[in-house]
Amino acid sequence: MAAGAGTRMRSALPKMLHPVCGRPMITWPIIAARSAGVERVAVIVSPDRDLGDALPEGVETVVQPESDGTGGAVRAAIEIVRESKEVIVLSGDVPLVSTEVISELLAAHRDSGAAATVMSAILENPGTYGRVVRDADGAVEKIVEAKEPGDATEAELQIKEINSGTYVFQADSLVTALGEVSSDNAQGEYYLPDVLAIMRSRDEPVAAFVAEDIAVNLGINNRVDLAAVEAEARQRILRRHMLNGVTIVDPVSTWIDADVIIGADARIEPGTSLRGATEIGESAVIGPHSTVIDSGIGARSLVINSHLVLCEVMEDCSVGPFAYLRPGALLEDGSKAGTFVEIKNSRLGAGAKVPHLSYVGDADLGEGANLGAGTITANYDGVRKHRTVVGPGARVGVDTMLVAPVEIGEGAYTGAGAVIRENVPPRSLAVSRGDQRTIEEYAERRMAREAEQESDS
């Protein structure tokens, strides 16, 4: 169910699209359900909120024409319910319902032979959560809402077992019961939990599965809730990686998104953020204070105090400190992007090095090439980008300007301070410099001129 207005988020972005650890909120329960073996997933949406681009491939959407409650949401998908044997109902704004707890709920439902099984939790302060009302034998009698005065009696409000908003139904029983749900309540809505009392009236058994995981009731209604859920999700992600053999030196200062992959024996130093579809290889060291977004870092590579976006760093590479690898940067095995180096849409061949204070854009560096400090590729002529090619084993001197399109041949050299506008043949040396001119006593004359200007003013 994902048709709520989400007005309390105070956001132009639909609530279900707000990210939780790099993943849109709505995709969390979808992924969990699919991993638990659910074959068909339908997301119930409102007419004015398009979630399509955020949904995983193969997920259907059903429009709930009007905002008439959780019962109305499931009624909007009645044809899908009719075509099913079992139906799991999940809330899109409760993202931390895990694969494990969904699997446990399904198993409990099948073992009980019930027409419906509700997932519940025990809370010391149940607040406005719906209460699970049981009969003298402990079976579920009904669920009463507690959002508005008059929804529940004082005795019912004392119940600590709450409805998590997650259910499993036998589809045929659900179809029949939905036809009898009424909107005669404080909010004038169709409450999905009302089908449980209807099933009971038909002598159909209703069961409850008490989940031990508190996350089953961590819903998101506003930005405060979002921060709380994301904090819990982050702790679970960090714990999973650490149990899988990753060293996270300071979990408090480390942020890792849900879909990040990290190999065994990798080390994540303090202040590091790993975002999006990033993948870190075995025994790599990331940080301190590094950000890696949608990038791949190979085994045994080192990324110190640097920012990487949409790039690939292969094995045994060194990046940073204070490097910036932009989209399209590729560092092949054993290459280096050192201190205050920026690389964009460029390939560094195996063992190539850009040690410090350089900009490399739209370039190809051959195996073992070396760019001296202050090397700049002038890749943009004001209209188009052009490429620079530096051959294998070439040595570019400090403070060299490579004006693209230009090619430095294999094993060639450039002198310090050169401006290279023409191709350099293999194993050649290219220099460009004007004659040095020395103006003697310049400082004295300048000081005298400045003093004269001050006296005139």
Image (cartoon, helix red, strand yellow):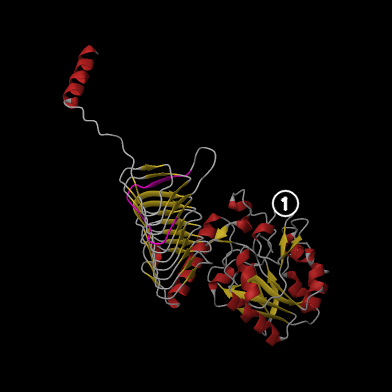
- Please tell me which residue lies in front, 140 or 24: 24
Whether residue 61 is situated above or below residue 446 in the rendered picture = below
Name the dominant secondary structure of the magenta segment: loop
Whether residue 389 is situated above or below residue 125 in the rendered picture = above
User: So how many labels did they put on this image?
Assistant: 1
Where does residue 196 sit, x and y in percent of width and height?
Answer: 74, 74
Q: Is residue 366 magenta?
A: yes
Q: Is residue 311 left or right of residue 77?
A: left
Q: Is residue 344 left or right of residue 100?
A: left
- Please tell me which residue lies in front, 324 or 213: 324
Residue for point 51% across, 46% down: 386
Residue wearing tag 1: 48
Check disc 1 and report its element: helix, strand or loop. Answer: loop
Where does residue 65 sit, x and y in percent of width and height?
Answer: 78, 56
Q: Is residue 203 magenta?
A: no
Image quadrant assignment for residue 199 = bottom right
Residue for point 20% across, 14% down: 455
Question: Mark 1 belongs to which amino acid?
Answer: Asp
Query: For the magenta stretch, what is the residue range?
Result: 365-379
The N terminus - image quarter: bottom right
